[in-house]
Every structure is written in C-alpha cells, then in structure tokens.
Amino acid sequence: MLVVMSNGATQEQVDLVCEAIRRMGYSPLPMPGAQRTTVGLVGNDRRVDDSLVVELPGVAEVIHVSHPYKQVSREWKPDATIVTIAPGVSFGGEEVPVIAGPCSVESEEQIIEAARAVKGAGAVALRGGAFKPRSSPYSFQGLGKKGLDFLAAAKRETGLAVVTEAMDDEGAHLVAEVADCIQVGARNMQNYSLLKTVGRIGKPVLLKRGMAATIEDLLLSAEYILSEGNQDVILCERGLRTFDNTSRNLFDLTAIPVAHSLSHLPIVADPSHGTGRRDKVTPMARAAVAAGADGLIVEVHPHPEKALSDGAQSLTLDQFAELMRQLRRVAEAVDRQITGVNVAAVA
Amino acid sequence: MLVVMSNGATQEQVDLVCEAIRRMGYSPLPMPGAQRTTVGLVGNDRRVDDSLVVELPGVAEVIHVSHPYKQVSREWKPDATIVTIAPGVSFGGEEVPVIAGPCSVESEEQIIEAARAVKGAGAVALRGGAFKPRSSPYSFQGLGKKGLDFLAAAKRETGLAVVTEAMDDEGAHLVAEVADCIQVGARNMQNYSLLKTVGRIGKPVLLKRGMAATIEDLLLSAEYILSEGNQDVILCERGLRTFDNTSRNLFDLTAIPVAHSLSHLPIVADPSHGTGRRDKVTPMARAAVAAGADGLIVEVHPHPEKALSDGAQSLTLDQFAELMRQLRRVAEAVDRQITGVNVAAVA
Amino acid sequence: MLVVMSNGATQEQVDLVCEAIRRMGYSPLPMPGAQRTTVGLVGNDRRVDDSLVVELPGVAEVIHVSHPYKQVSREWKPDATIVTIAPGVSFGGEEVPVIAGPCSVESEEQIIEAARAVKGAGAVALRGGAFKPRSSPYSFQGLGKKGLDFLAAAKRETGLAVVTEAMDDEGAHLVAEVADCIQVGARNMQNYSLLKTVGRIGKPVLLKRGMAATIEDLLLSAEYILSEGNQDVILCERGLRTFDNTSRNLFDLTAIPVAHSLSHLPIVADPSHGTGRRDKVTPMARAAVAAGADGLIVEVHPHPEKALSDGAQSLTLDQFAELMRQLRRVAEAVDRQITGVNVAAVA
Amino acid sequence: MLVVMSNGATQEQVDLVCEAIRRMGYSPLPMPGAQRTTVGLVGNDRRVDDSLVVELPGVAEVIHVSHPYKQVSREWKPDATIVTIAPGVSFGGEEVPVIAGPCSVESEEQIIEAARAVKGAGAVALRGGAFKPRSSPYSFQGLGKKGLDFLAAAKRETGLAVVTEAMDDEGAHLVAEVADCIQVGARNMQNYSLLKTVGRIGKPVLLKRGMAATIEDLLLSAEYILSEGNQDVILCERGLRTFDNTSRNLFDLTAIPVAHSLSHLPIVADPSHGTGRRDKVTPMARAAVAAGADGLIVEVHPHPEKALSDGAQSLTLDQFAELMRQLRRVAEAVDRQITGVNVAAVA
C-alpha cells in the first residue's frame, strides 16, 4: 500500500499517517518527492484495509500494490493447473476439449439426439441447462431435476462428460450427482454462498465471468472456490456488457492471455454467449483458439429453430461439424490439438 | 414483434415469415416499404419467442415492441405503490424516509450507538449488514446470525425500522425474523432463487440495481418478486460500473425519473455506494432528492476510521446531521419532506 | 512513480530498475516488502515516461502517482476560477447562470423568437448551433456562417450573451467574431488542433466532456487550452455512453463535485444531452443544481415538434419557464441563486 | 419507422400520429395489437426524423428500422471492396497485408532502420506518426512536417507503402503528399471536418474506430468519406474503453465479422493499441487473423525501451519476426495468406 500525501501536506500529517500504519501492525516508509511525499507500507502480505489512513488530513490518495487474491495467482503456483473433468477430458494442457450441446435440456429425446450428434462431430463433453437463470420470470426456467435425469441418460448413452449449471446451494448438490463439472453462471459469479458450496463439494467447476466483472473480480471469485480446498476451477470468458448492442455482448478474447499471465488456472471461451449470434460463433471460436483458449463451450441444437431458449445463437449440427473442421486447423497452427481428434486425419 | 426483411427479400420469403407467425398462434401484418418489407405480429400479449422467425431466409432483424415485464409496469398499475416497512416509514408518497447506519454490524455496542445517533439526526430506519458479500474471501464477511441479534437489540432500543441484506435462501429466512425490509444486494440482483424466496416470504424488499444492470433488468428482477405475490418492492439505485475510476461507481440519478415513468414502484438512492467517497455523499444525496428519489440509504458510522468495511464512504455523525439539515431544504424545494422532520421547525 | 517488482525478483533486477531511474534523472528509493520490493521514484514533477522501466526483467507493474495535468488542478490554484463571458454572466461564483436556446439555428426569426422567449424566462445566455456535428452525413449540418449572422442579430435584439460551437480551426475564428463563449463539443474534446486554436484565440471556452472521457481526460483537454495562455475554460458534463439505452446517455452528476475537488475551473451541466429526453430534463436540471453545478445549458425550442435536430430533448417555452421557477427554489436551498433572478421575488 | 402507442392510447391519438406521418410525406399503417397499437411508416428511404411524432400524446416509443448509412452498406454493394494503397498492397481480398513500424517517427535513422527491419520480416507497409494526438499537452507531439520527410526517405529506401495519421485539414494535405494511406485516429473518428477533407483528397483512408464508438458510428463516419466520392476506406478495430483496466482497451474482435456482415469495406485490426501490452500483441494478432481480419497494423520499434511514445506496446524486431511466422500459419489455417509471403516456403 502506498499513501500519497497532497502537495501541501505538513510533516505532522505525514507523521500521523506513519503512526496509523504502525498501529495497523506494519512499518511506514516515507518517500519525500519534489511535489509531495508518499508513504509506503512495508510488510503487508495481502490487501490492507486502508480505512485507517484514507481519511487522515493531508492524504490525497491510497494506492494498493498487492493483488487481493492469492491461491489462484501464477505467482503462488507457476505451473499451469490441468483440470480433468473425466478420463481424457482435460483443460489447461496441450489439448483443447470442446464442450457442446443445447442451451437447455428440453426432453430426453432432444438431449440424447444432441449428445450423439455433437459426439459424432468431435465434442468430448455435453452442455445443457436443467436449471436456467432467465431475466424474465415468464421465460422457460428449465426442467430442473428431471433435466438432470435426462442428462444422466445422455451420458450413459454416449459416454460424454456432462457440464451443467447450478443456481443455488440445493441445486449444486443435485447437479453434483450427475455432472462431471458444475457450471456457475455469469449472473452468479458473485453469489458467494454458491461459490463456497461448490468449493466444498469438490467437483470441477466451470466459472463464468460476469457481464461487468473485471478479470480480477473473476479471479477473486475463483479464489472463493480454491479457499474451500477445491483446486479444479476452469475460468470461462463469455462476453461483457457494453454500449454497443450490435452483438449481444462484447467478447473479450484478450482475457485469455491476461488470465494466463495472472493465474495458473485454465480458461475456456464461450463464443455462443460471447457473440449472441449464430453467424458470428464460428469466426470467434477460431479466434479464441488462436488466442490460446484451453477449451470451448458451444451451443449446438439439433433443431435451433425450435429451441426453447437462445435458439438464435445455437449452431446447427452441420454448422458445428464445419466449426470442428476449422478449429482443428487453427489449433494445429498454434501447436495445439482439439481433444479426441486424430491430427493425422486432418492432413 | 416486428420482423424486418432484408431489402432483397422475395415475396416467398415474406410469405414464409407470415406462415411462421401464424404457426406461433398470432396474425402477421406485412408492411411493404420503399426499401424493404416489414411484417408485424398482431395479438401478442407479452414478449414473443422469436426463434421461429429470426433465422428464416430474408429476415434482417427482429424488433420487440412489448416490454418483457408486466406487474411492475406503470401501464399495468398507473398509481404509485407506497411501500410501508414500519409505522410511519413509507416509500413512494410525499415523504422521503432516510435509512442510515454502518456498512456492517460489528458489535452490539457499535450498532446501538449508531442507531441512537442516526435516530437523533432524523433517520427513521437503520441499515447494517450481518451477512456481507465481499469480493475477496479474505475480507470481513459479517457477523452472520449474531449480527442479526444485535440489529434486533438496536431496534428494541430505538424503535428504528431495520433494513439488512440476505445473500441466500437460508439467510433470507433468518433476516426476515428480524428485519422490517430485506435487502437484496447488487451482486445478487439476478440470483433468481433468492428473488423467488423473498417474493414468497412476503416482507418488503429493497432491491439494489446490479453494477451492469439496465433499468429493464432491474424491473425484470422486481417482477420475479411480484410474480410470487409480494408487491412491496423498493428499487434502489447504487451506481454502475464504467470506465472512469475517479469515483467507485457511476451514480445514475436519471434512473429515478426513468423508473418513475416505467414503473409504479418507489425508488430510493444510495449515494454512499453510488459515489464511494465520503466527500461526495452529501452533494449527491441532495441531487438524488432533487431528482425525485423516494428515499435515501446512507452509510454512517460513529467512528468511520475504525470501520471493518467501507469506512471511506461512511459519513461521520456530524456529517450526517449536516446532511439531514441540507436534505430538508432541498426536499422542501421540490415540495416533499424528509420523513419525521417537522417542516415548520426548518423555516 | 512507483515500480512494483514481481515477488520472485532478484536483487540484480531491483538494481537495474534503480539504475534506469537514475538514467532518467531521478532518484530511486527501494522499499522491500514481505512479498515483494517496490521502488519509488523521488523528485518527479509531472508524469514520468515509464517506458524505460516498464519492460525491465522482474518488473510487475508501474503505478503513476502524480496527475498528468497541472494548470487546471486545484493544487496549482486553490481558489475557484470565475469565468465571465459577458457583463453579469459569470460561472464559478455564487450565481448560477442558465444558457438556453435551440439545438440549431434554423432561421433569423426562429433564433430571435427563441432568444426573446428564453430571456423572458430568465436565461442570461443564448445557445444555438450554426455548425452542427452530426453522426450521419445526411442529417442537417447547420446553417454555417449565415447561422452566426442570425445569432449576432439575436444578440443585438436581446443583449443575451451567445454560446455556440466551433468544429474546426477556420470555424473557431468565425465563431469568435460573434460568440461570447466558444463551445467545443463532446466529439471534438480530443481534437487537439481545435483545442490549441481556441486556446490561442483567448475567448472563453465551454468544453464538453466526451462520451467516453474520464474526468482526467476532460481536465487534460482543458490543460491544452490553458497551456496556450487561455484561463477562461468552463467544463461541461453532458452524459456518457454506457450499456443502458433507456436514456440517450448516462448523466454523470458526480462529475460536478469531483471536478470541484480536482480543479479550480467551473463546471456546468447539460441535462438536455445528458438525458436525451424532454421529460427527464427538469428533474435532472434540479439535481445538477443540487449537486453544485456552476451553470446549466438547456435546449429550448419555441416549437420543438418542428425542430430540425434534437427536437425530442428540447423543452417548450412553457416547460422552460416552469424549469426556471423550480431551479430558483433548488438553488436557494443550496445557498446559491440563479443569475438574473431576484431572490426576494421568489419568496 | 415504427410508432408504438401506449396501451391506453385512444383512437384519436392514433389518428394524430397517422396525420403527423402524412405531414412528413409518408404513409401511416396502423397495426392494432392485443395490448396496444403500433403505426408503421411506409415508404421511407432512410432514417426519418422522428421529432414530429415522438412527443405526441399516447406515443410510447419510436423504433427505427432502416440503417442511417447507405453507401458503406453491404446491401448497397454486395461485393467486398478491395482497397489498394500501393502496388501489391491490397486490403479486402484473400491476402492479409501487415503494416508495421514505430508509434512515432523520432529521427531519420530510427524510421529507416525500422522500415528496413519490418520489411525484412515481411511487412508490406510502414506505420509511424509524424503528427501525434496525445492526451497531455506535455507529452511528445510528433516531429510534424519533418517527420513526414523522414517517412518519405524511408519509403524511398525500402519501397514500403506509408500509412500515417492526419489530425486536421492542413495536416491532411501535408500527409497526402507523402502517404499512400491517410490514417484518421480514434480520437478524430467524429471530427467531421477532417472526414470530409480526406474524402475530398481521395487517397485511401484508414479509419480507426473511436474508443466509445459503436460499429454503426464507425460506418457512419466512413459514410462521410464515401459521400465525398472516396470509396477507398479501410476500417480499423483498435479497442474500446471499458471498466476493466487490466488491458489498456477492450479489443473487440467480433467487430470484424460484424463489419463484414454490414459493410463491403475491409477491416483491419490493431492489436498494439487493442491490448496496450507487448506480451498480449502476438496472441491477439493471431486471433484477429483467425476472426477474418483483412490486415493488421502493428507497432514495432527497433529499441522499444527508448521509444518516445507507447514503448510498452511495441514489439521488438525479434518478436515481430516471430509474430509473422505465427501469422502465416494461422492465415493458412483460415485459407488466406499474409501478403508478400511465399506460402510454399511455410510448408
């Protein structure tokens, strides 16, 4: 922490700041400048509460230097974490797994048909919401527990790993019985009760970045999960809210290399929510892999025109198969490979 | 709903759209234009799922006309809703109640001292968090159930109404036993499980706008509560996240007249979180009342320099007393009055 | 400037940073911390170019402490600057002048009619664009030089001071012949050629904040004008662009007390552009005065339904007269008064 | 244009709207709905001024259907425009040219050294600012006309095409004498005087997207240039301003496929400004090509640690050579090729 004094600050005021820092248990280090004095705080091991000094007379500004997170940081653990959600489905290594499936589970037939189809095109995990967070109480809210049963059936049929969202503590325990990876959605990124619960459950978690969350916020939310003893967190970029409504969201692909710098956790990209429009999913999925994404999560629906939610951003099966063909080539160009795809077969 | 055809759309494509609209149970109304045809959908009573038409050939864009919310809208109920959380503490009428108190409940002495002091300066309700949503797992998380007991004690001592936050379903039931009004925080504005729970509990709810929530989003979240049968919702503007970090948030006071146009629900303002800086609270509290706020919620701490959270935005008791004096004059200038204050005494 | 070393930085790397700072002509001050070392730079008088150190091995982050502006800062000049654009029309003191008029000058009759009317209701300066920056090349672009002649005529008729926009160097000189105050619009806030030109011309300047400008950006743009020797700059808040399209812009009234803290320059508010909707202008104008605005600039059109631009946000004459009545009361409540209005008459 | 009546609107109010539309020279088409009536406007050929109807009694909302731009749209010209700035340097076709060079021209030696080096690594055009828009008046403002002379020398030496920025009308004419392509910077994207000037000059223009500009805004600014008779416009994505300061800007790569859908103009990406950090340039350049960018503009400095501006985002020559190697592989993976690179040589 660095306390910047205003340029008319007196020596008494500087002394008061030093005293306050001492009272907080740290050592003050005054640095006189040409225009003003700054006082450093020596010995802090994490973010310091600045309330004791911020309002003292003569203080112009308080600047925090240390990151407020710890276990998620690459400084803490330099090697990349590899999160394995099922045999052969690992995020954070050389391989890039693709999770695909419909926005919502709508029926047993629909989810099994979708699972078979995305598996055929190369996906190694199935997505599909049983519990759906919807802006309007009048929109389809998901099939709930019955949807989880259908996901379990699709898993038995195809062997695909299952990723599905939990919205509250009770739901998290239900989801954990069926899913290989529990998704925490963007709207719940700062639902700390839920974060602690999935931290304690201990299953891998796919944590989506909130619509207005900085990368630091995302890492802090991941820290909640790690601090409960669960290291298996996969970050997910899914688009931010901004002033331009041309796309549904602003897909922040720079978050991928930034997260890789700051954290050892893997990060995947969701080009379906990130763009909100079917015809933009394929180019932006390619871009995500080129930027270094450790995986993709893509909405695919056997019959998007009949989807009960988010139909406009779901790929058809043909589009998904074509996407996978393109992704293989881009992955190879950045020395990675899409999980489950025989590279030799591409050449 | 209005379907805009691209300017090279054929008659067959227009016919297909009309047919799709008929299949959805509505009547299509084609409107040929100089450049292109648009097709209106007649007879919809709420937001129509557009997935059947948005991807049809020749469709350029789909525009939604109806609002996706209903019971919260002023069209649905033209008269302002007055939410009474305790005898004499009503939001939405001519009077403007002020809720004040510390960010967190820290001890029985602290909260009782604060309650007495804010009551003395004219506040009619006490705020103070027992359950605290914090970005970092290493920050003070509140005293929990014990904090609720201390709030109950402060209420017994002073008679002030109590407003405090709930973060999950279990907490909401605990809070409901003590509080006169349950607060749902900005980070949980789209925690739909929690919204339904507080809707079913039936106590008044203070619903804070999320950091990146549009006013429509806020109203949709309120609609979740009303749709469970609870009409007593107080909206709260507390600042948005933007690119300028000079203030902690961007306090959107225009939300006040906008909410009044769109909805019959009362809306209060939180200048403490809205600005994040103690020295900006007073001018922006005045501005909120001048803009038409139906109440204020302000952070006041007997000893802000010792506060365990948000000390830098808490007013001292003297500053709060001065704020109340200023608010009375501004309220009078817009033909309203601060609850509990004898106007005659001001003149 | 403060150089934060990464937590594995070696002593050699710290030494390299110190050496680089010495080469830049400053003194380094290393501060060892529990987790990492930071190195302060002593003796800087303004923003230091960090490129020599930011990429050195072991450097985690560089933090700037000093503000990059100087002459506009309140530290530089503690007393508020009062900008007088015409006799009796001063911004920055106790009085609050109101500038009013149509968005565009459309004809001699229109602008004279408008000038008489706004004067009658209490405005002391006339606004009206002769040069109009429009997003589309197909929108009305203003009457240009002829529009300036009409403004001059309106000034002769009414004695009102004139505020009108210049969009380029040539236009700035034309505007300066007629106007009492040259407006630089939001889109040109970072048109540095124009800023230098109006700095050299020396007439008072009303500088509008850009749609995505921080307050620091605004102050830096003002610094361009002051650094050419022109102290007469009036800042203007007119709304920012954000994700919520309910209003045309997000009117950032907190900018008013923030600018007052950081700078000695006066700041006025434009509730017409700030909200974009006629029915929101009055409450937000009241809020601006309550927040401490040093003036207002309001769009008023004798016949808004016939306006060639921005009709939807222009007040009618009756609405403007009512606004002035309300403003007088709010100004009085914050111990100020609307310029030209006999306070006694209000009581 | 579509006029949405409020749900209590009377038939008289609907008739008034129809009458207003007729007075505007169009035909009204009322569409009664279950909840409310909407009135379409038939026969408009471009954005209609809505001020005559937006404030009529009973009108809830006005929705615009047509795009406000025309010549830049893909509907107007379905085939992609190819902009050739010099022999063999074309944007918008299968090839992807790379423009590289330092932020600023600092000396004849520096720019010639940089030009030779970037040419050696495969760049086909040279960037380098002679006129520099800087937030602070105290920052280095470029060498001006002398910088143009140095650019001309570098062009003679290397044969590279030259792209450099103009900030005002006078500068645009000077730049046009030397440059093969005139850059209009982000801060001047809505400097309409400058846009018209470069439109009339007729040389190719690289138009950078403003920090808070929507893609529609960018296209409207391009329309200013095209409407002066100059078709040779290259759009450029360079990052938006948002709430997350982890990166300098938010690089909106989705703008690439979106611009391709809406417009026939080519679009290039600037990963240097788009990310603001050297170590993020390479992954995001790869991502831009994977997303479909028609070119790249990259900051490269022979000695970035000595750069007078933007050193922290400039690549070293080695990093640039490595970038080009990576780009070739990604371009090939999306069936394109980096201009001037022998694809056979890559295999």
Image (tube, coloured by chain):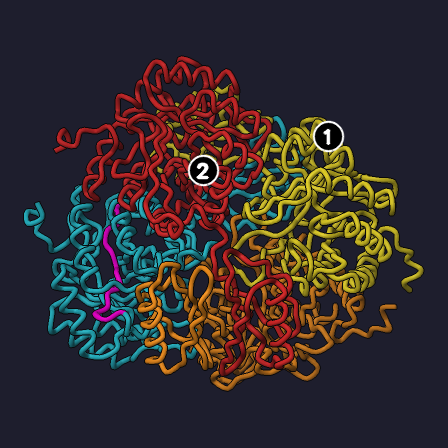
Chain colours: A yellow, B red, C cyan, D orange
Query: Three-letter amino acid code at disc 2?
Result: Leu
In front here: B103 or B248?
B103
Q: Residue at x 55, y 80 (%)?
A: D178
Instruction: Please tell me whether residue D210 is drawn above or below residue C53 in the rendered image.
Output: below
Q: Amino acid at mark 1?
A: Asn
Q: Quadrant of residue B62?
A: bottom right
Q: How many marks?
A: 2
Looking at the image, residue D150 sits to the left or right of residue D10; the answer is: right
- Quadrant occupied by the C terminus of chain B: top left
Going by the picture, which residue comes out furthest to the right?
A344
In the foreground, B100 or C77: B100
Q: Which residue is mark 1?
A: A230
Question: Is B329 part of what is drawn in magenta?
Answer: no
Q: In the rendered structure, the residue with mark 1 lies on which chain?
A: A
> What residue would you read off at disc 2?
B207
Q: Nearer the viewer, mark 1 or mark 2?
A: 2
Query: Can you give x and y, in whole percent of width and height, for residue C173 in the image?
Result: 28, 74
In this picture, is D54 found above or below D246?
Answer: below
Label 1 secondary element: loop
